[in-house]
Amino acid sequence: MKLQAILCLLLQLIFELSSCTHVRVIPGSTLELPCFSFQTEFNGAAITWTFNGNVLSAQSTGSARVKKDGLYLSISPVTAANEGEYLCLLKENNMEVIRTYNITVDAMIGYTIKVIEGSTLHLPCHFPPYSQVRANALWFKGMGVGKKTRLNPGDDSAGDNDRVELLYPLDHDQTIIIRDTIMEDAGIYDCESAEGEKLSTVYIIVEVAPTPVPPSCDGFITAWEPCQDENSRTGEPMLQESMAEFSMKLFSYLRESNPSSNLLFSPISISGALSHLLLGARGATRRAIETAVCVPHDFHCVHFQMKKLREKLASSLKMASQIYYNPQMNLSESFINQSIQFYEAEPTRLLETSAESTQMINSWVANKTNNNIKHLVDSVSPSTQMILLNAVSFSGQWKVKFDQKPKKGLFTKLDGDLVNVPLLYHQKYKAVMTYVIELKAQVARFALTGDSSLYILLPRSNTVASLQQVEGKMTDIAVRQMIEQMKTRSSQHVEVTLPQIKLDFQPDMNILIKKLGLSSLFEGADLCGLYSEEKVVLDDARHRAFLALTEQGVEAGAVTTMSFSRSFPSFSAMRPFIMLLWSDQANVPLFIGRVTDP
């Protein structure tokens, strides 16, 4: 009956405000049509309902039934056969009152979403995966057959549309959210391209909100439960599998937002930062973060295993995550202690002024990354509750050195343009090289100190289509299979040509967190293990990754390079490629990147 009541309310709104009698419904729904949208004095009057000219009654066959002496017509379930004109005729003495409905049954609804009044509503819409996004999609709300009103996400001048936000501007994902949902938000919404192509249709049902329960941390203020079996043989491989799955999920999101530009991120650092936050998460927020980082909900040893992982990587990877918080917050003592125990990070209070806090954060980042990353935040608002940060830096030397003589060569970009770049060249480099059929890419593995390897995946051509084809096949299973396959191959002498590069990339972590299903962090999270007095809002999240290929190895360094001759099987990455920096010791990805313009 809730659905019926909602539909009646929606219809009354339309009729009374606009006198429009067109109704658009979906198959399978329940619809009640009132003969009047106002209180009537016509007690005992004769009421007749007709459908396309045929009289309906309480005994009529089919899904349409007259109810309450004709005051309502109920249609349940709605089918395509119910499409047409419904007429309510009231006769009393010498007067007739007629009410007409034109019903359109829309079978093209892509999504039906039921939401509670007052909550935040997500309306999904996506451009085709390999299309180019030149403009944002347009969202409309249906107001009857042939009538619609356009939504203007984020436009404060558009009345209630300040509740509407486009989550990922100029992204393949054109999902919008509607905050503080009201009953009048119920209805049918269309998402279209600027050219008018329909991308998504969403049917929204709004239900009356139950009596709100005040947020409480009762039962959730204890410390994270201990790892009962620290010597278990399953904990480490479980984290490795989760890390690989999380990495490829991040890569799929980031390559959608950056379809053809240089790209670099460190999945282990982002996972480390979210795991750090997980330490204080409880209830629904805990389950959401566990799902986001791909760890099982009963994996109590996640923080212990993260500590072991960080210790394994300490010789080559400088990784730091930190939480800065408002001085007025009294963080849980157990959270502070476990933060130090598992992440070597003592949560730090923000300072009195924005400038002081900004300087403190950036100095910390520079110190933790050996000055490879010196700037991460521009300013800190005085009202900030909490900031989650992470930064990484890797240093590894080539086990086989490249030529020291400077060389240069032409790198072919995706648009066909040639750019003259310094090279890393070796006529007889000892490396593992093969063609991986599952990824449709030529792959070379270069051994590094610190028990790590750099994998370079070279698509079949320098086109966007070839690059996206390889990236689309890079699932966590496919990547792990590729690495195992490369371990079985013997190294050979290969003529190697690589561009020298220096990547410094800062993805939009706030958007990435939303794509991971963690929008609630920005709206009020259950972080009772961190702060038990009220819900905490995450104001900002940052990630910055730096990586360079030089003649010394994978690190920051000087530039060199010139021309050469060929005499051995060759691997020439002088066109767009994907690279994967992998820890052989920990069996997890450290960096994932794409080079389209060195």
Image (tube, rainbow, N blue to C red):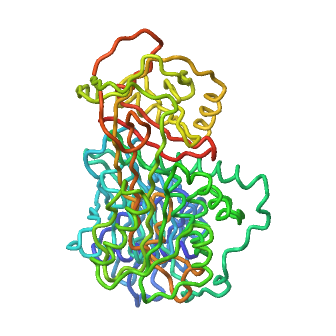
If the image is split into quadrants, where does the C terminus sit?
top left
* Location of residue 474 in the rendering, given as x and y in whole percent from the top left corner: 52, 37
Q: Residue furthest front?
A: 404
Residue drawn at point x = 56 percent, y = 40 percent: 452
Q: Is any atom of residue 211 visible in this view?
A: no
Q: Quadrant of residue 306?
A: bottom right
Q: Nearer the viewer, residue 473 or 385?
A: 385
Q: Nearer the viewer, residue 478 or 25?
A: 478
* Location of residue 495 in the rendering, given as x and y in whole percent from the top left corner: 44, 17
* Location of residue 55 in the rendering, given as x and y in whole percent from the top left corner: 49, 64
Residue drawn at point x = 41 percent, y = 83 percent: 326
* Location of residue 22 in the rendering, given as x and y in whole percent from the top left corner: 35, 63
Q: Residue furthest top?
A: 567
Q: Is any atom of residue 359 visible in this view?
A: yes
In the visual, does 518 lie left or right of 477?
left
Q: Is residue 405 above or below residue 150?
A: above
In the visual, does 382 lie left or right of 224?
left
Q: Is residue 133 above or below residue 445?
A: below
In the visual, does 305 lie left or right of 66?
right
If the image is split into quadrants, where does the N terminus sit?
bottom right
Q: Is residue 563 above or below residue 478?
A: above
Q: Nearer the viewer, residue 581 or 475?
A: 581
Q: Is residue 189 above or below residue 443?
A: below
